[in-house]
């Protein structure tokens, strides 16, 4: 698909309308945050890679923008740490075709478990940054595990994803297995998404902030789904332009098709458009469940000064930070050069 599919655009537009999403430009720029992050990308991350300054600038734009948009209530110190982790992950994701890099990545968790030093400067920096995350979340075992472990699993999951792509040479057998293992695409996406970490970040805006986990923990599974699948949907256009066929939308399409589901294809086959439509509906339902668990509507009424029984200041703080991520994460996809999206194509009612 070399141009934006009208079906794809209509599905996304409908989803954003149903979510009552309205794009708002950033009110201001945190110059201190961007200056510190720029220095880190250029003089700390850069020397551990072979990337040019232009390519590093793209990582800076994508990672810095994601955290600026998604964590609007976080301190500069906390946002800077989150942005570093995202930048490191982008480098891993964009270097997965490098065989020498993969050989080192395969030893990353092993070195951690044995307490041995990493063999490359990049992975030493990756591990050191995870240690910084541990210090930030030192007062909560639950949030600490959520914030750190997914970034270890992310590396191993990316390697498995690559291995599975290379091994899919037996098309009939692969199709048969995909029709049986219908939950596998989602399982693999969780392992490569590290989104549980981002959920922890949503509710940690400052080192001294200690929001009670029991107030938002039941929303975690749906929040992980929101982060993964919103990215899958909004990055699909970019990936179609690049000819990628091993992303979550395509793997789930193949699985649903092999399982015998009927879709909108010319011969009644299940298509990527059908998967996008299904995911948009699932995403809408998941978001509404999160909003309900976190009592978003009642909290926002309280923020407007209206009567809202049974909602306290902690509820409001949690809901406010979720709203910041909920809308900011979507806006970031439209603003990031990485995703090649024309925001005007998705705005307005259906």
Image (spheres, rainbow, N blue to C red):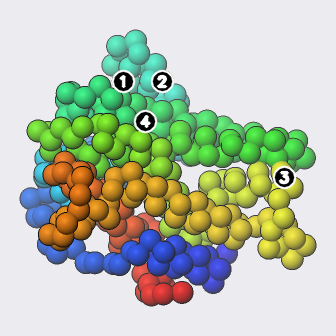
Give the alpha-carbon distance from disc 2 to disc 3, as whole Å. 35 Å
Give the alpha-carbon distance from disc 2 to disc 4, as whole Å. 16 Å
User: Are dots 2 and 4 in contact, CB under 8 Å?
Assistant: no
Element at label 3: helix
Q: Looking at the image, tell me whether mark 1 or mark 2 is earlier in sequence order.
A: 2
Q: Looking at the image, tell me whether mark 1 or mark 3 is earlier in sequence order.
A: 1
Give the alpha-carbon distance from disc 1 to disc 3, as whole Å. 42 Å
Q: Position of residue 345 (x, y in %)?
A: 49, 85
Q: How many marks?
A: 4
Q: Residues within 10 Å of mark 4 (few under 14, many from 20)?
A: many
Q: Looking at the image, tell me whether mark 2 or mark 3 is earlier in sequence order.
A: 2
Q: Position of residue 29 (x, y in %)?
A: 15, 69
Closest to the observer, 31 or 72: 72
Which of pointers 2 and 4 indicates the residue nearer the eye? 4
Give the alpha-carbon distance from disc 1 to disc 2, as whole Å. 8 Å
Element at label 4: helix
User: Circle 4 sits on which residue?
Assistant: 150
Q: Is residue 137 above or below residue 161?
A: above
**Quarter assignment of residue 325:** bottom left
Which of pointers 2 and 3 indicates the residue nearer the eye? 3
User: Circle 2 sits on which residue?
Assistant: 107
Q: Looking at the image, tell me whether mark 1 or mark 4 is earlier in sequence order.
A: 1
Q: Is residue 247 above or below residue 110?
A: below
User: Circle 1 sits on which residue?
Assistant: 118
Give the alpha-carbon distance from disc 1 to disc 4, as whole Å. 18 Å
Which of pointers 1 and 3 indicates the residue nearer the eye? 3
The numbered mark at residue 258 is 3
In the rendered structure, the answer to whether residue 71 lies left or right of residue 152 reads left
Element at label 2: loop
User: Are dots 2 and 3 in contact, CB under 8 Å?
Assistant: no
In the rendered structure, the answer to whether residue 38 lies left or right of residue 142 reads left
User: Are dots 1 and 3 in contact, CB under 8 Å?
Assistant: no
């Amino acid at each position: 698909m070399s141009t934006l599919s009208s079906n794809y655009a209509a599905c996304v537009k409908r989803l954003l309308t149903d979510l009552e999403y309205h794009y708002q430009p950033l009110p201001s720029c945190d110059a201190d945050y961007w200056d510190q992050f720029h220095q880190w990308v250029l003089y700390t991350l850069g020397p551990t890679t072979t990337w040019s300054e232009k390519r590093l600038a793209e990582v800076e734009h994508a990672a810095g923008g994601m955290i600026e948009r998604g964590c609007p209530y976080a301190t500069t110190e906390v946002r800077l740490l989150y942005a570093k982790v995202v930048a490191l992950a982008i480098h891993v994701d964009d270097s997965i075709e490098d065989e020498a890099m993969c050989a080192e990545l395969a030893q990353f968790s092993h070195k951690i478990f044995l307490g041995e030093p990493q063999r490359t400067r990049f992975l030493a920096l990756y591990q050191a940054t995870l240690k910084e995350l541990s210090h930030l979340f030192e007062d909560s075992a639950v949030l600490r595990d959520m914030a750190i472990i997914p970034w270890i699993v992310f590396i191993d999951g990316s390697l498995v994803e690559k291995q599975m792509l290379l091994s899919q040479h037996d098309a009939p057998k692969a199709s048969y297995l995909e029709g049986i293992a219908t939950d596998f695409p989602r399982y693999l996406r969780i392992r490569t998404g590290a989104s549980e970490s981002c959920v922890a970040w949503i509710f940690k805006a400052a080192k001294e902030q200690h929001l009670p986990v029991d107030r938002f923990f039941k929303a975690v599974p749906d929040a992980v789904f929101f982060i993964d699948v919103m990215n899958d949907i909004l990055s699909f256009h970019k990936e179609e332009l690049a000819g990628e066929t091993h992303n979550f939308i395509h793997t789930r399409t193949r699985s649903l098709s092999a399982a015998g589901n009927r879709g909108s294809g010319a011969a009644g086959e299940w298509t990527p458009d059908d998967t996008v439509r299904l995911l948009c509906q699932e995403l809408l339902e998941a978001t509404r469940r999160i909003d309900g668990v976190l009592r978003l509507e009642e909290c926002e009424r309280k923020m407007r000064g209206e009567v809202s029984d049974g909602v306290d200041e902690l509820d409001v703080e949690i809901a406010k930070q979720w709203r910041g991520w909920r809308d900011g994460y979507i806006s970031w996809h439209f603003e990031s050069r990485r995703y090649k999206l024309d925001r005007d194509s998705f705005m307005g009612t259906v």
